[in-house]
Image: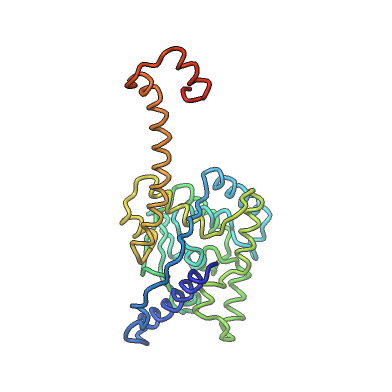
C-alpha cells in the first residue's frame, strides 16, 4: 500500500467517526468535511467471473455440509444472498428475521437499536434499503429458519456466538458499536479464505461478492442511480467506478464482436481488390481467417 493510499484510508476512517458524531448531535459539523483526499492510484475492482462464482458457491455448499450450525456461519446461504443483494458483510451479519419479508420476497437493511434481543448497529452510508430476493433464495431462508431454534433473531449469527454475545460480552460491557460492525462472527476471513482455496480461486475477499453483484446489475442494464440506491452508496462517484469497470468490459466485448463482423465485410468491400496471390499470402499471416 502506497503512502497516499494509506493516508487516504486513515482520513476516510476519521471522517466517518466525525460524521457519526454529527449524526448523534455530539458535534455541530464535521471538522474534516472540507479536507481534500490525497490522490492515489486507482485500484482495479476485483470481480468474480461466472465460473468463479459457481465454484465458490459449490465450495461453500461442501463446506456447509460439514458445518456445525451452532458454531459456524451458513456460508452457502450467506454467499448466495450477498450475490443477489450486494449486501455488505456487516449488513448480512446484522440482519434479523424481522428484516425478511417472505411474501414480498425482500430483505431490508435496517439499523438496529439496543434491545434485550438485539444490539445497536448503524448502516454505513444509508438509513434503509429494501432489496429483492428470488424464489430459490426465499426457500433457502425458509429452510434455514425452520432449522434454527426459537428465540434467535439473527439470520446468519450462529446460535453459540449469539449466546456468547448476549450472556457474556454484553452483560460485562464488552460489546460496542464497533464490535457490531467488525466482530459479530469470529474468523469470517479465515472461513471465506478456505472456501476460496477449495474453489481454486487464488485471490479475493468477501467484499468482492458485493462488487460482483453491483457489476452484475450494471451488466444487465440497470441505471447508475438505481444501482446507487440499491447498493447504499453515499456518493455517486463510488457507483460510477463500478459502471466504468463494466463499461470497459463492454467496450472490449464490442471490439471483439466488431472485429469478427468486419472481417468478411472488409474483404468484400475493401477499397482495393485482393488478388488470389495476395489472399494466399495474407491467409498465411493469419490476417484473413
Image coords of residue 50 (percent x, y): 52, 44
**How did the renderer colour the structure?**
rainbow
Q: Nearer the viewer, residue 43 or 246?
A: 43
Q: Is residue 198 left or right of residue 77?
A: right
Q: Is residue 99 left or right of residue 53?
A: left
Image coords of residue 243 (percent x, y): 38, 52
Residue occupying the point 60% across, 64% down = 188
Q: Residue furthest right?
A: 66
Q: Is residue 82 visible?
A: no
With respect to residue 23, does 103 lie above or below? above
Q: Is residue 42 visible?
A: yes
Residue occupying the point 59% across, 46% down = 55
With respect to residue 156, does 165 lie above or below? below
Q: Nearer the viewer, residue 128 or 207?
A: 207
Image coords of residue 169 (percent x, y): 59, 81
Q: Quadrant of the N terminus?
A: bottom right
Residue occupying the point 37% across, 27% down = 262
The answer to which image quadrant residue 175 occupies is bottom right
Residue occupying the point 45% across, 47% down = 135
With respect to residue 172, does 136 lie above or below? above
Count numbered badges in the picture. Answer: 0
Q: Residue furthest top?
A: 276
Q: Nearer the viewer, residue 32 or 37?
A: 37
Amino acid at each position: 500500500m502506497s503512502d497516499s493510499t494509506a493516508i487516504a484510508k486513515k482520513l476516510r476512517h476519521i471522517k466517518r467517526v466525525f460524521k457519526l458524531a454529527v449524526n448523534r448531535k455530539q458535534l455541530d459539523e464535521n471538522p474534516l468535511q472540507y479536507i481534500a483526499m490525497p490522490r492515489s492510484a486507482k485500484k482495479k475492482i476485483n470481480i468474480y467471473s461466472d465460473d468463479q462464482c459457481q465454484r465458490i458457491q459449490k465450495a461453500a455448499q461442501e463446506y456447509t455440509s460439514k458445518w456445525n450450525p451452532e458454531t459456524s456461519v451458513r456460508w452457502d446461504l450467506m454467499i448466495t444472498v450477498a450475490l443477489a443483494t450486494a449486501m455488505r458483510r456487516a449488513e448480512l451479519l446484522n440482519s434479523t428475521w424481522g428484516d425478511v419479508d417472505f411474501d414480498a420476497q425482500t430483505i431490508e437493511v435496517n439499523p438496529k437499536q439496543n434491545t434485550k434481543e438485539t444490539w445497536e448497529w448503524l448502516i454505513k452510508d444509508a438509513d434503509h434499503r429494501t432489496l429483492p430476493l428470488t424464489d430459490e433464495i426465499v426457500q433457502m431462508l425458509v429452510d434455514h429458519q425452520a432449522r434454527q431454534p426459537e428465540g434467535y433473531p439473527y439470520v446468519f449469527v450462529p446460535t453459540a456466538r449469539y449466546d456468547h454475545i448476549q450472556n457474556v460480552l454484553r452483560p460485562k460491557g464488552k460489546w460496542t458499536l464497533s464490535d457490531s460492525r467488525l466482530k459479530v462472527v469470529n474468523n469470517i476471513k479465515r472461513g471465506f479464505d478456505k472456501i476460496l482455496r477449495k474453489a481454486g480461486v487464488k485471490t479475493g475477499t468477501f467484499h468482492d461478492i458485493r462488487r460482483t453483484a453491483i457489476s452484475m446489475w450494471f451488466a444487465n442494464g440497470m441505471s447508475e442511480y438505481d444501482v446507487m440506491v440499491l447498493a447504499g452508496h453515499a456518493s455517486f462517484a463510488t457507483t460510477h467506478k463500478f459502471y466504468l469497470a463494466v463499461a470497459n468490459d463492454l467496450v472490449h466485448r464490442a471490439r471483439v464482436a466488431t472485429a469478427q463482423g468486419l472481417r468478411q465485410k472488409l474483404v468484400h468491400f475493401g477499397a482495393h481488390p485482393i488478388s488470389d496471390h495476395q489472399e494466399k499470402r495474407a491467409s498465411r499471416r493469419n490476417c484473413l481467417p
